[in-house]
Amino acid sequence: MVDERLRTVDEHLAIILAGIGSIDPIELTLLDAQGLLLAENVDTPIALPSFDNSAMDGYAVRAIDTRDASPESPVTLQVVGDVAAGAKSRSGMGPGLAMRIMTGAPVPAGADAIVPLEQTDGGVAKVAVLEPARTGSHIRRAGEDLTAGSSALRAGAALGPQQLALLAAVGRDRVTVRPRPRVLIISTGSELIEVGRRPGFGEVTDSNSYLLAAAAKDAGADARRIGIVPDDHAKLLDVLESQLLRADVLVTSGGVSMGAFDVVKQALTELGTVEFTRIAMQPGKPQGFGHIGGRVPIFCLPGNPVSSLVSFEAFVRPAIRKLLGKRTIHRATVQATALEGATSPAGVRQYRRGVLHREASGGYSVSFAGGPGSHLIASMASSNCLVVIDEEVTQVAAGSRVTVMPLLLSNR
Ligand code: AMP
Ligand code: MG
């Protein structure tokens, strides 16, 4: 065996990120843009609010007319009409008069204050005002939120509910955003069958395409399962070629090890633009990454389900986040107390499935879910985090602190 120095996870990720460009912005309707980053500066053509309006149900008055009002000697004003929200024209009123007004209704010309209903007798033809009003009280001024022509949101803003509300308020029903990368998932292996049929001897139901499509979707991608391709050179190249135009990222699983039928590695190595490397990580040692069709990044992940998940988390997720334009492309990690010990080979970054617990004291503790075997789907399903055991660590003692990457569902 050749004494080969394995590439580290960090080195491999750096190579991947350097090979990930950006996707042209697209225009989307507001709710389709949720969770994405704005790719344009949006100025508001209108002021917010766009007209002076009442903040309360009450009476529009001239403040000076209520100067002497008190509960003992109320000031009585004649009510010359009602203004409701949605009034299409601005009403007006003269001195010594009042208009009944509803929240959001335009303040009549001639009025400079709103007396809340609670500070009156609620009269209809005339109203007794029990307290003096200050000039401008309970009036929301035109432009006090945003003036016409000013900036509403800048490129790069993340579009959550609050930002979508603002875009709607300033009249934008479509905006230009960084799109969700179209990530296509291909499972390779002649043993694989579609879900729904009971596997015969030697057959394995394809679960990786669900794992990877769901993980890609959770990372923010527009993810699709393309299906199963057998271990057949020509079929694999056909499928890849037919999907190229539809993809911003391709992800395959399986067929990247040393086996005689590891056709992903064989077929794509021949293309010359995809490199197959061994990474100092466990699981997930064999990895392929490169570009096909001169443009589309392709990740070739090992087929064991746990290896696929770990490889996705280590390499594909950060790439998807970069394509989305996100500032934080890495998952947050926490420090937790290991509830049991573990060993890890020197020079290898080990990712173990774990169950993270929140302690009453506020800290975290973590136990391991299942063994290190990367075929263990059920123990993977019982985990909620990855425990990351760094390259230089060979022994984790029970009670020591370890780095944990919670696999929280994102808010997409
Ligand atoms: P490979 O990386 O192709 O050598 O596959 C490694 C192991 O993972 C084999 O036991 C495969 O049967 C299994 N495997 C590969 N692809 C999938 C898949 N899509 N779903 C479930 N298991 C898979
Ligand atoms: Mg295989």
Image (cartoon, rainbow, N blue to C red):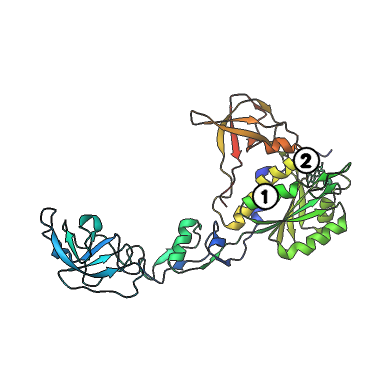
Task: Check disc 1 and report its element: helix, strand or loop.
Answer: helix
Q: Is residue 292 above or below residue 393?
A: below
**Mark 1 to mark 2 CA distance (whole Å):** 35 Å
What amino acid type should be assigned to the residue bearing mark 1? Answer: Ala
> Position of 132 compared to 271: left or right?
left
> Position of 183 compared to 303: left or right?
left
Q: Which residue is mark 2?
A: 4
Residue 251 visible, this angle: yes
Residue at the extreme top: 398
**Quarter of the figure with residue 32:** bottom right
Q: x%, y% of residue 101?
A: 28, 65
In depth, the one of 225 and 397 nearer the eye is: 225
Q: Nearer the viewer, mark 1 or mark 2?
A: 1
**Tag of residue 214:** 1
What amino acid type should be assigned to the residue bearing mark 2? Answer: Glu
Q: Quadrant of the N terminus?
A: top right
Q: Earlier in the sequence, mark 1 or mark 2?
A: 2
